[in-house]
Amino acid sequence: MRIENKQARLKWLAFPFLLSCQKIPFDGIIKELQSMIEEKK
């Protein structure tokens, strides 16, 4: 796995936390991210 991929994954992991800090519902976003991750596997 490339370093760039790890950095991108960290950004995606941090994204929902940032949204939750702003109290925005992000269930749909998480589902989209999960489907994207499944496609990459």
Image (tube, rainbow, N blue to C red):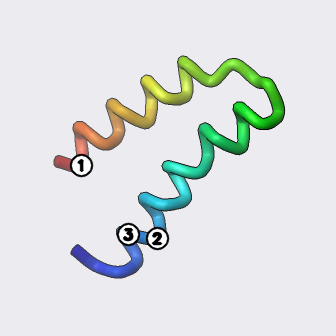
Q: Which residue is mark 3?
A: 6
Cβ atoms under marks 2 and 3 closer than 8 Å = yes
- Lateral position of residue 7 relative to residue 19, left or right: left
| Left or right: 8, with 17 as reference point | left
Q: Residue at x 23, y 37 (%)?
A: 38
**Mark 2 belongs to which amino acid?**
Gln
Which of discs 3 and 1 lies nearer the camera? The answer is: 3
Crowd band around label 1 with a 10 angstrom C-alpha radius: few (<14), some (14–19), many (20+): few
Task: Residue at 43%, 24% (x, y): give it.
Answer: 31
Q: Which residue is mark 2?
A: 7
Q: Looking at this rendering, what residue extends furthest in the left direction?
A: 41
Q: Indicate the quadrant where residue 28 lies.
A: top right
* Residue that appears at 76% across and 24% down: 24
Q: Secondary structure at mark 2?
A: helix
SS state under label 1: helix
Q: Residues within 10 Å of mark 2 (few under 14, many from 20)?
A: few
33, above or below 5, in the image:
above
Mark-to-mark CA distance, 3 and 1: 13 Å
Residue type (three-letter) at the residue carrying disc 1: Lys
Return the x and y of residue 1 as percentages of the image width and height: 22, 74
Residue 40 image position (x, y, % from top left): 24, 49
Estimate the x, y position of residue 20 in percent, counting from the top left: 71, 31
Counting labels gives 3
Q: CA distance from mark 1 to mark 2?
A: 15 Å
Given contact means CB atoms under 8 Å apart, are the residues at marks 1 and 2 in contact?
Answer: no
Q: Cα distance, mark 2 to mark 3?
A: 4 Å
Question: Mark 1 highlights which residue?
Answer: 40
Circle number at residue 18: none
- Marks 3 and 1: CB-CB under 8 Å? no
**Location of residue 39 by image quarter:** top left
Residue kind at label 3, given as amino acid type? Lys
Q: Earlier in the sequence, mark 1 or mark 2?
A: 2
